[in-house]
Image (cartoon, rainbow, N blue to C red):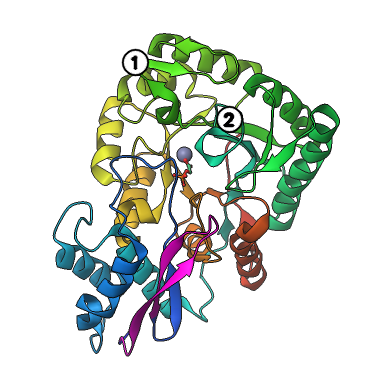
Amino acid sequence: MIIHELHGEKVLDSRGNWTVKAYINGTAGTAPSGASTGSHEARVMPADKSVSIINSKLQRLVGESFNQAEIDILLESIDGTERFEKIGGNTAIAVSFAHFNAIHKSNRIEKEIFPYPLGNIFGGGVHGGSSTFQEFLSIPVKAKTIYEALETNAQLHQRLREELKKKTKIVGINDEGALTADIDDLKALDIITGIAEDLGCRIGLDIAASEFFKDGKYIYRSSKKALAPKDQLDFIIEIAEKYKLIYIEDPFEENDFENTAELTKKIGDKCLISGDDLFVTNEKRLLKGIKTGTANSIIIKPNQAGTISMAHDTISLAKKHDYIPVISHRSAETCDSTISRLAVLWGAPIIKAGVIDMRISKLNELIHLWNIAEDPRMAKLGF
Ligand code: PGA
Ligand code: ZN
């Protein structure tokens, strides 16, 4: 596709901060951003700087013709560093998304298998809320259609809100639209699993453990518990069994491959052990995981890598080695729904994209893709 026009704009994200939006031939792509970011992610430039890079340095793309791989490789080479230190991973992903969306604008995605939504129902950590664990997640494993799947997660969110209102005075909503309340992590798990069973959902957690790892210990907020890594391992195994968890993300701090591998060995046959801050959508870090038997699932956040093609290389490697890929949004988002199209295009069996608020833009895009597919079906999860 020939690029006739490329420009950048500064726009607001869901936290009320500025982010960068790129337009290619009138079609947009917008960079999301994280709060519990992994330290090995692509660098984020201030939005103003990012916009000015698009409107000056990157104007050399105008007049040229690229496919997705070509433009992504060019962005990497214009930057010249491993983690987009010069132009910013946010700049690169906005341009990469805009290019992808311009190509796929009116095209039906020729894929029929749809991802299960992994919904963030209740939360805390750095996204706001008093729980130590960052995300209490739901997978509607019994759903046969995307409609059923999305409705089930929404119902769980609604029923939990009612239940929490009966138990505590203040019930809120955090950065990702997850419910928050002043209750302990285990109490929250008790309540959520009760409703989830009724609705046919299974439960998972994003522990985001790096965020509460201080001086060699995992510090739990409400119980004032401080666990050494080995005790954290025992605790995670205990709750995985008690609550029949099928998904656990970042159970240890971002560089602890060893304990993550140990956990995978112990419960990886019945639970997905997923790396987010651990792998940061980076091929080299995933390769280390594969070699060491660390985790069996990976979060794919295109902006952690910097381009769609880099994220694609990582997901291809994951699939080759039977790691279950989970395409994911960030805690600060816009209505950009590129990741929904990528999830279907790449055949990811799971997508983490929220349940309510502006996050529905991604969910509703899945519904649209479902409606224009010839014979749409949900992915096989194997549990
Ligand atoms: P972030 O977190 O987008 O705030 O980095 C989301 C996650 O940890 O999955
Ligand atoms: Zn995470």
Residue found at x 51% / y 61%? 13
Indicate the position of residue 308 as horizontal and vertical percent values: 35, 62
The segment highlighted magenta reads 3-23
- Which numbered disc covers residue 216? 1
Indicate the position of residue 185 as horizontal and vertical percent values: 63, 23
Q: Quadrant of residue 74?
A: bottom left
- Extreme residue in the right direction: 166
Residue found at x 41% / y 51%? 301
Mark 2 lies on a secondary structure that is loop
In the picture provided, is 331 more to the left or to the right than 92?
right
Instruction: Out of 328 and 49, give the one closest to the viewer.
Output: 49
Indicate the position of residue 380 as horizontal and vertical percent values: 58, 45
**Crowdedness of circle 2 by 10 Å Cα count: few (<14), some, many (20+)?**
many
Residue 140 visible here: no
**Crowdedness of circle 1 by 10 Å Cα count: few (<14), some, many (20+)?**
few
Residue corresponding to mark 2: 246
Instruction: Out of 258 and 145, give the one closest to the viewer.
Output: 258
In the figure, 230 relative to 327: above or below? above
Indicate the position of residue 280 as horizontal and vertical percent values: 34, 43
Q: How many marks?
A: 2
